[in-house]
Structure formats: C-alpha cells, structure tokens
Amino acid sequence: MSFLEKFTIGYALFIITLAILVVIGWVMNIIDLVTWKAEITAEFIIRVAGIFVPPLGAIMGWFI
C-alpha cells in the first residue's frame, strides 16, 4: 500500500482542523498578552514564551 493510499480524507481533515485550532489558540494567547493589565507573573512569562513557541502559545490561549 503506497503512502497516498494511506493518506485518507479523514486524516487530512484531522490535520487541517488541528492546525487551525493551534493557530486560533496562538492568536488568543497574543490577544490575552496584549490586553494584560496585571503585574509580571509566571503566567505572563509563559505567555511571552508562547509567542515564540506556537504549541505552548496555543495551550496557553485555549486553557489558561
């Protein structure tokens, strides 16, 4: 079975959906960081690091 046969439409949709969710979470992290009104905390530092490490930014954007 070749690679193209294994690469099904369902798998492609899963990867595209996951990528879209990561981008949305990363943008939400940046928006939270721009509107930050509190003092500098560990969460703030992790959010700044999340700008340069998109998976971390996506997690911070969606869950924290």
Image: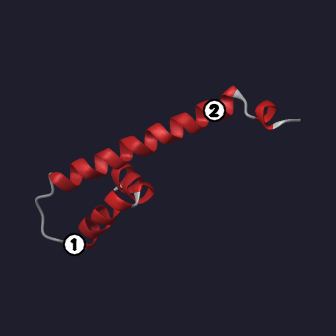
Please provide percent x and percent y for residue 3.
79, 37
Question: Which quadrant: the N terminus?
Answer: top right
The residue at the point 60 percent across, 30 percent down is 13
Residue 2, which numbered label?
A: none
Please provide percent x and percent y for residue 23.
40, 43
For marks 2 and 1 on the same chain, the one whose residue lies earlier in the sequence: 2
Q: How far apart are marks 2 and 1 (CA)?
A: 39 Å
Mark 1: give few (<14), some (14-19) or many (20+) Cα within 10 Å: few
Please provide percent x and percent y for residue 34.
17, 53
Q: Nearer the viewer, mark 2 or mark 1?
A: 2
User: Which residue corresponds to mark 1?
Assistant: 41
Q: Residue 20 lies in what quarter of the image?
A: top left
Q: Residue 49 lies in what quarter of the image?
A: bottom left
Which secondary structure, mark 2?
helix
Image position of 17 (left or right of 11) = left
Mark 2: give few (<14), some (14-19) or many (20+) Cα within 10 Å: few
User: Which residue corresponds to mark 2?
Assistant: 12
